[in-house]
Structure formats: C-alpha cells, structure tokens
Image (tube, grey):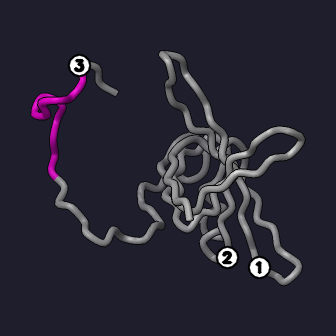
Amino acid sequence: MKNITIAGNVTKDGEVRRTQTGNSVLGFSIAVNGYANGEKTTEFFDVSLWGKRGEQAEQFAKKGAKMCVSGEFSTRVYNDKTYLQVNASDFTPMGGSGGNDHGGGYSAPPSNPSPSRDLDSDSIPFAPEWRI
C-alpha cells in the first residue's frame, strides 16, 4: 500500500455518487502547487472519499477551497495519459475561497501528538529569510 498526504486547492465542486449497491462516494480533484528546477509546477490528483466521510466532506469540497487529504495513492492510464489518484481515508478542510471556512479537521487524531509551541522564524536557526 502506498499512502500519501496532499494539500491543495479543490479544482471543481465535489460530487457524491452512488454505486449500484448503494454505497456513496465523493469525487473531486485537488491541484497541488510546487517548484521544480526553479519553475512553478502543478500536479492534479483525483480524489475519492467513500461512505459517510465523503458525504460529510461534500460541503467542504468546493471549487477554490483548500483541502488536505490522506489515503492510498495509485495511478491509472487512459488515452496515453497518466492520472494520479488518492483513495482518501481522511480529510481536513483548510479554509479558502470555496466552501465553509472551518478550521477543524475530520482526520483521525495522531497516535503520538506532539505538544504545540508558538515559534516564530527568528527562534528557528534554519528558518529561511523569506516569510510566507
């Protein structure tokens, strides 16, 4: 099993569909921006979120919304094009222009939560000069 966690922008409103057996699945796509060789890159992931989690996530999976998902990574080839897919098990809405701006997540709690501390970049010796 190949697990992946991605965070990016939802590219179009998610849509809940039903299988012939009545199972629900939410389908949407996430664009993840990055940099390679000094140039901006964008990777697109097709996301499937099954059952109640998918139904809950539909209200957050709106075009432009920021979303983080974790799950099993796979690829498929169609018409000589490779598609990146995530069969998500967890999701966390991150706010943004689409959907409701909820800061809370819907993923399982970490097994070993670390204590949170407020740090600024001046107290981190390896922090870059630029700020986000």
- Residues at circles 2 and 3 in contact by the CB criterion of under 8 Å: no
Q: Please tell me which residue is depicted at 14% across the width and 34% down the height of the picture.
A: 124
Residue 129 appears left or right of 24: left
| Relative height, residue 20 to residue 82 (above, below) | below
What's the mark number on residue 23? 1
Residues drawn in magenta: 117-128
Q: Position of residue 42 (x, y in %)?
A: 61, 31
Q: Which residue in the protein does label 2 denote?
A: 51
Q: Position of residue 118 (x, y in %)?
A: 16, 46
For numbered disc 2, what is the local secondary structure? helix
Q: Which residue in the protein does label 3 denote?
A: 129
* Circle 1 residues within 10 Å: few <14, some 14–19, many ≥20: few
Q: Amino acid at mark 3?
A: Glu
- Residues at circles 1 and 2 in contact by the CB criterion of under 8 Å: yes
* Circle 3 residues within 10 Å: few <14, some 14–19, many ≥20: few
Residue 21 versus residue 36: which sits nearer the camera? 36
Q: Amino acid at mark 1?
A: Asn
Which of pointers 2 and 3 lies earlier in the amino acid sequence? 2
Give the CA distance from mark 3 to mark 1.
49 Å
Give the CA distance from mark 2 to mark 3.
44 Å
Which image quarter: residue 71?
bottom right
| Relative height, residue 38 to residue 91 (above, below) | above
Magenta region, mostly helix, strand or loop?
A: loop
